[in-house]
Image: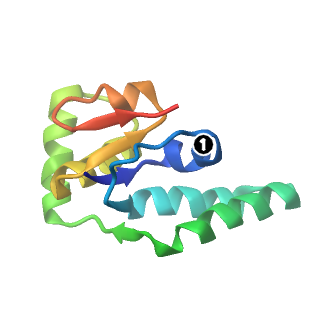
Amino acid sequence: MRALLDTSAIIDLPHLTLPSDVEAWAVSAVSFGELEAGVLMATDQSVRAERLRQVAALSSLVVLDVDRAVAGCYAELRAAVGRRPSNDLWIAATALAHGLVLITADERQASLPLVRTALVS
């Protein structure tokens, strides 16, 4: 299987058991932006250093951009679920557009329609 890590899974990564059958991992540019914002917003230096380490650890992953196909999937998801945190839908839309399983630690994200998901803990 090919999979996309969402932001919740990336943040909890050290504490999660990930599926062993994943052949290729990716991350959404939206998640990358959320993580980089977390680095910049951290006021505690040790927290900032840990967050920066998390971002650096993702450097080997493919970062998938938002394009027209992702935008179309976002529209489908938004129409199906209504109001939801926008970034969550963009991340899910990225997985949907690329035919990836969305790996998440967020139960609400795992229950999205249209998207194949795997809830990890």
User: How far across and down, in percent of the image, does residue 72 sit?
Assistant: 12, 52
Q: Residue at x 47, y 43 (%)?
A: 18
On the image, which quarter does residue 15 sit in?
top right
Q: Residue at x 41, y 58 (%)?
A: 30
Return the residue nearer the eye: 51 or 77: 51
Return the residue nearer the eye: 90 or 9: 9
User: How far across and down, in percent of the image, does residue 79 sit?
Assistant: 15, 33
Return the residue nearer the eye: 38 or 64: 64
**In this image, 104 relative to 2: left or right?**
right
Q: Residue at x 46, y 31 (%)?
A: 106
Query: In the displayed image of the protein, which residue is found farthest to the right?
Result: 45
Return the residue nearer the eye: 100 or 37: 100
Q: Secondary structure at mark 1?
A: helix
Q: Amino acid at mark 1?
A: Asp
* Residue denoted by label 1: 12
User: How far across and down, in percent of the image, does residue 44 sit?
Assistant: 86, 55
User: How far across and down, in percent of the image, does residue 22 sit?
Assistant: 34, 53
State how the image is colored: rainbow
- In the image, residue 112 sits, relative to residue 13, either above or below, namely above
